[in-house]
Amino acid sequence: MIFYPQRTGDARRAEIRARFPGVQELFVEAPDGTRLHAWFLKSGPDVVLYFGGNAEEVSWMIDAAAAQAPGASWLLTDYRGYGASQGSPSEKDLVSDALVWHRYAVHELHASRVFALGRSLGGGVAVRLAALRLLAGVILVTPFDSLTAVAQRYYPYLPVKWLLRHRFDSLSLAPAIDVPMLCLIAGRDEVVPPVHAERLYQAWGGPKRKVVLAGVQHNDADAAPEFWPSIRRFLDVK
């Protein structure tokens, strides 16, 4: 119930390349041999690693990032089993793959600074990456404190903490993370109630800024007028 992989076939990828001639397709091999895919939109010297939601096909962000935050380069990663990446998703593997993409951004793309932007489920990946590697900053969109806490809200009569394999416990990591964080909370989030993002925000150990996006729900946070301006200010780009 956590992962809903969205695949991108060859024809669709060809359409994307034709529409966005400036975008590159990148493939890397994970330590276990799994072939991973990402879209790379090159612009400024800083690189933003993008980790999407649990049912997100990330190529839509090519247009949005190019139009709204062109001063930074964007590495839009496909989880295992999503887009054109091989394999099957799990918490352990998604975090391991995030480390692969971070290493690629530093050593192959020669990023001046690396940021992580995680949306919903991707917030759990971004927080784990921030706990394991030095980042310039973290942007969390409609994040949660832990999947265990969210699942317990929906299934109060089940022993969720014993059943859940993929916990994404960001709350336990947050106090020890001292990099800057921007938290974008959907004011009418019907999937992850705002209280879960608030708990994570309060626990964050580093400099932090919170923006409550009034009137928007979980999947349309980017439609809020404050969404992209807040991100541009955080990245310090035009």
Image (cartoon, rainbow, N blue to C red):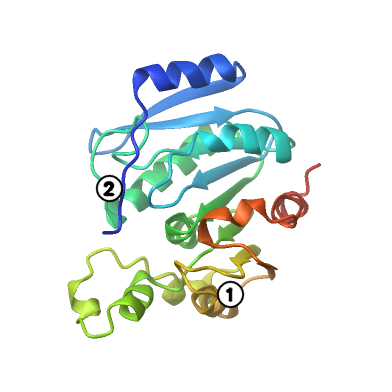
Image quadrant holding the C terminus, namely top right
**Secondary element at tag 2:** loop
Image quadrant where residue 41 sits: top right
Tell me which label, 2 or 1, sits earlier in the chain.
2
> Disc 2 marks which residue?
89
Q: Amino acid at mark 2?
A: Pro
Residue 41's disc number: none
Q: Is residue 186 above or below residue 17?
A: below
Q: CA distance from mark 2 to mark 1?
A: 26 Å
Density class for disc 2 (Cα within 10 Å; few <14, some 14-19, many ≥20) is: some
- The picture places residue 162, in percent across and down from the top left corner, at 18, 77
Residue ranking furthest to the right = 238
Q: Is residue 211 above or below residue 94?
A: below
Question: Which residue is at 45% across, 54% downward?
Answer: 122
Image quadrant where residue 201 sits: bottom right
Q: Amino acid at mark 1?
A: Tyr
Question: Which residue is at 56% across, 51% downward?
Answer: 117
Density class for disc 1 (Cα within 10 Å; few <14, some 14-19, many ≥20) is: many
Question: Which residue is at 69% across, 35% downward?
Answer: 45
**Secondary element at tag 1:** helix
Identify which residue, 70 or 68, lies in the foreground. 68
> Disc 1 marks which residue?
201
- The picture places residue 146, in percent across and down from the top left corner, at 40, 72
- Left/right placement of residue 218 relative to residue 13 reads right
